[in-house]
Image (cartoon, rainbow, N blue to C red):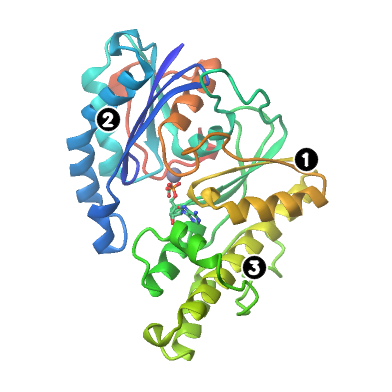
Amino acid sequence: MLILGLDTSADDTAAAVSKNDRILSNIRSSQIDMHEEFGGIVPSIARRAHKANISRVVAKALKQANVTFDTIDAIAVTIGPGLAIALEVAIDYVKKTATTQKIIGINHIAGHVYANWAKNRNGNPKDSPEFPLIALIISGGHTELLLMDDHLSFEKIGKTLDDAAGEAFDKVGRMLGFGYPSGAIIEEVAKSGNPEAFEFPRPMEKHDSLDFSFSGLKTAVMYEIKNLGGMHSLSRKKIADIAASFQQAVFDSLLIKTVDACKKYTVKRLVLGGGVVANITLRRIFRKELKKIGVDIFTPPLPNLSTDNAAMIAVAGYYYAQYGRFIADVAMLDRDPIYSVEDM
Ligand code: KG4
Ligand code: ZN
C-alpha cells in the first residue's frame, strides 16, 4: 500500500511517502526563519507559508519516492492537535486533489508515537516495539505519558499542567539569547557546561501523580539569571552551566515520572517521541536509567523522525489502515485543534 503522509499542524510543511511502514521519502519545508523574530509560531504566517509550499513539498516527496500521485492508495493527513488555520491547509489540499485514494485522518501525537514503527526502504530495523508499552511524547506543544495495550489504543496517564518540555527549552533559550526554537542550541551549549553547577527544582517530584510542570523551573532559571546580574553580565562558562543545569532538571523531571509510570503499570517497554527526543543527552540518560529497572527503550529509528515530519504520519496511516480506520467521505475530513489521542 502506497501512502502519502501530510502534516501542516505547526510551522513545518511536511509530506512523505511510505510503502506500508517503509519510508520512501520524507520532505519538510521549515518556516523557522519567518517565525524566529516573534519568538514563537505566528498562525497566520504559518498558514500563508503552508499554502505557498504544499504543492511543491508534495511533488518533491512523490519524486523522491519515485512514484506518481495516481499510484497513491491512501492519503494520511494530520487533523489535530495543532493550529486550526494551519491544519486546514493540508486538509483543504486533500479535498482538492484526492481522487480514488482512501482518506485517513491522523492524530499528530499518535504520529509521534508511530515514528517508532518506521522502517527504511529495506525494512530495517526489523524489531518493532511490542505491547503493552508506555509512550512519552515530548515536543514544543505537548508532554504526555501514554499507556498503550495495543495499536491505536491510548490512555493518557500523565501530562504537563502548564508548559510543554520543548516550550520550556524555547523560553529558557530566549532568556539566554539563543533565538527560536532553541532546544538544539541548548543541547549544544550544555555540552561545555556543568549540569550540577546550579540546583534548579525538579517540579512535581514530590507529587503522587504522573503529571509534569515546567513553568516553575523556567521561572527559577529567570531568577538565577537576575541574581547573577542579568544576561549581559554572564560569561560563556556561566551560560553553558545554566544551559546544562536546566537541561538536566528537565530530563530528571521527565525521568522521575516515566520510571514511576513503568513501575506503576508494570510495563517493560518505553517508546519516546517528539522534538525533544532529538536530544542525544536525553536519549543517553534515559537508556542508562531505564536499563536499571529492566525497561527496553525505543526511539525513532531513522533521522528526522523526532521533530515534526510527515513520515510518521504515513506510518501511523499504515496502522490506521490495518484497522480499517478510513474516513468514508473526503468531504467529512475536518480539523480538530484540540484532538486528544484518547478520543481517537
Ligand atoms: O515535535 P516538534 O518538532 O513540534 C511539536 O509538535 O511541538 O518539537 C519541537 C520542539 C521545540 O520546542 C524544540 O526546541 C524542541 O522540540 N527540540 C529540542 C531539540 N530539538 C528540538 N529540545 C531539546 N533538544 C533538542 N536537540
Ligand atoms: Zn509534533
Left or right of residue 110: residue 3: left
Q: Position of residue 334 (x, y in %)?
A: 32, 31
Contact between labelled residues 1 and 3, with CB atoms less than 8 Å apart: no
Q: Is 210 in front, or is 178?
A: 178
Q: Is 343 in front, or is 324?
A: 324
| Ligand 1 within 8 Å, label 1 CB | no
Q: Nearer the viewer, mark 2 or mark 1?
A: 2
Three-letter amino acid code at the position of disc 2: Val
Secondary structure under badge 3?
loop
Three-letter amino acid code at the position of disc 1: Lys
Contact between labelled residues 3 and 2, with CB atoms less than 8 Å apart: no
Q: Which mark is residue 204?
A: 3
Q: Quadrant of residue 175?
A: bottom left
Residue marked by disc 2: 57
Q: Position of residue 227 (x, y in %)?
A: 48, 90
**Ligand 2's quadrant:** top left
Q: Quadrant of residue 65?
A: top left
What residue is drawn where x is 45% and y is 44%?
A: 307
Q: Nearer the viewer, mark 3 or mark 1?
A: 1
Left or right of residue 326: residue 87: left
What residue is drawn where x is 24% and y is 47%?
A: 46
Disc nearer the start of the sequence (3/1): 3
Q: Which mark is residue 312?
A: none
Three-letter amino acid code at the position of disc 3: Met
Residue marked by disc 1: 268
Left or right of residue 26: residue 199: right
Distance of label 2 from label 1 (alpha carbons): 39 Å
